[in-house]
Image (cartoon, rainbow, N blue to C red):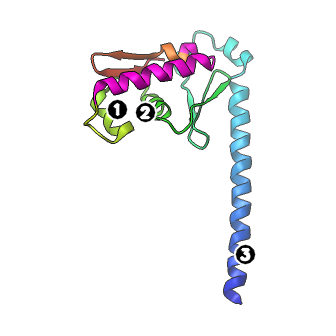
């Protein structure tokens, strides 16, 4: 009986924690969207290199300049996530294959294909400037902000 009571208390506490976590995530998302509103963009024009895209792993979305685009649990999301970790720094195709695909046996054509699809998704989501900032050069890729 004591074990059942403790289990019920634990379940109640866990549900409370889940509700709090959802509320925190919603609050943070609202704050980020407010910061990236059109007014904030107008005030910070010319200082875009200081801003990085926000990648939300709970929804597999990218937030950029007030827009939110759900990429899903895809290679495109994880590729952008990896490039955004070190913006303005080139990452080798071997590092990308290891970090994103957990394999070094794939070809560089695989990366090129995923980059192409990522750029298309970003453009269709109204993030053309972010799509244009993903650059590739001789087996190296960079998120140039």
Q: Is residue 138 visible?
A: yes
Q: Which residues are magenta?
A: 107-129
Q: Considering only order in the chain, which callout, 2 or 3, is on the residue closer to the N terminus?
A: 3
Distance CA(mark 3)–CA(mark 2): 40 Å
Q: Residues within 10 Å of mark 3 (few under 14, many from 20)?
A: few
17 versus 22 height, above or below: below
Q: Mark 2, residues whose alpha carbon is within 10 Å: few (<14), some, or many (≥20)?
A: some
Q: Name the residue that disc number 2 marks.
A: 82
Question: In the structure shown, which secondary structural element does the residue marked by tag 2 occupy?
Answer: helix
Q: Residue at x 60, y 17 (%)?
A: 124
> What's the CA distance linking mark 3 and mark 1?
45 Å
Taking the magenta stretch, the answer to whether it contains residue 121 is yes
Q: Which residue is mark 3?
A: 9
Q: Nearer the viewer, mark 3 or mark 1?
A: 1
Residue drawn at (46%, 35%), measured in percent from left and top? 78
**What is the tally of numbered marks visible in this picture?**
3
Q: Quadrant of the N terminus?
A: bottom right
Q: Could you tell me how far apart the alpha carbons at marks 2 and 1 are, in whole angstroms?
A: 8 Å
Label 3: which secondary element: helix
On the image, numbered disc 1 is attached to which residue? Answer: 96
Nearest the eye: 45 or 114: 114
Residue at 40% in and 16% down: 135
Categorize mark 1 by other alpha carbons within 10 Å: few (<14), some (14-19), many (20+): many
63 with respect to 131 (left or right) = right
Is residue 125 magenta-colored? yes
Which quadrant of the view contains residue 58?
A: top right
Left or right of 50 in this view: 1: right
């Amino acid at each position: 009986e004591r074990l059942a009571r403790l289990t019920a208390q634990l379940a109640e506490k866990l549900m409370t924690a889940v509700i709090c976590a959802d509320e925190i995530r919603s609050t943070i998302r609202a704050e980020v969207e407010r910061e990236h509103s059109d007014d904030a963009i107008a005030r910070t024009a010319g200082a875009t290199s200081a801003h990085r895209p926000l990648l939300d792993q709970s929804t597999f979305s990218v937030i950029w300049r007030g827009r939110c685009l759900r990429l899903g649990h895809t290679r495109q999301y994880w590729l952008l996530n990896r490039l955004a970790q070190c913006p303005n720094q080139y990452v080798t195709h071997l590092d990308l294959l290891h970090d994103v695909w957990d394999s070094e046996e794939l070809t560089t054509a695989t990366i090129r294909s995923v980059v192409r699809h990522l750029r298309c998704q970003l453009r269709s989501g109204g993030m053309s400037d972010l799509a244009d900032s993903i650059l590739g050069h001789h087996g190296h890729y960079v998120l140039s902000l």
